[in-house]
């Protein structure tokens, strides 16, 4: 799209043909303008990989939080059970 516009075509015509708004076009131009296609593809691939890794990290952090919560509840249940047990010398 950017190259088409740079060849002299009107921005509105290029956007209409590609089904996007002019605001989107200018956002892309600010981000990818002046880049070769290979660099733009590499940037997009890195952004996708970064998003995937962030999602994996968030999932791992949630799993860890749930395990910590379960472990703390399990420890409290054991202490409570021991304190009510008449045969336990530590109670």
Image (cartoon, rainbow, N blue to C red):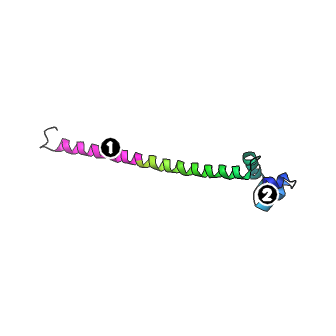
Residue 21 in percent (x, y) is at: 76, 55
Q: In this rendering, which labeled residue sits more in front, label 1 or label 2?
A: 2
In the foreground, 37 or 80: 37
| Quadrant into which the N terminus falls | bottom right
- Residue 16 against residue 65 in the figure, above or below: below
First-in-chain label (1 vs 2): 2
**Magenta-drawn stretch contains 23:** no
Dominant SS in magenta: helix
Residue drawn where x is 75% and y is 57% of the image: 20
Can see residue 24?
yes
Residue under label 1, please give it.
72
Q: Residue 89, how many percent across, how many down? A: 13, 39
Residue bearing the label numbered 2: 15
Q: Classify mark 1: helix, strand or loop.
A: helix
Whole-percent x, y for residue 76 in the image: 28, 43
Residue 27 lies left or right of residue 68; in this view the side is right
- Magenta part of the protein: which range? 64-91
Residue at the (55%, 52%) spot, across then down: 52
Q: Does the image show residue 11? A: no
């Amino acid at each position: 799209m950017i190259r088409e516009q740079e060849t002299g075509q009107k921005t509105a015509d290029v956007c209409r043909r590609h089904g996007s708004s002019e605001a989107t076009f200018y956002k892309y131009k600010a981000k990818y303008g002046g880049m070769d296609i290979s660099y733009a593809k590499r940037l997009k691939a890195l952004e996708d990989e970064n998003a995937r890794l962030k999602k994996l990290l968030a999932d791992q952090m949630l799993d860890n939080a749930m395990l910590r919560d379960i472990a703390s509840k399990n420890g409290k249940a054991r202490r409570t059970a021991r304190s009510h047990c008449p045969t336990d010398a530590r109670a």
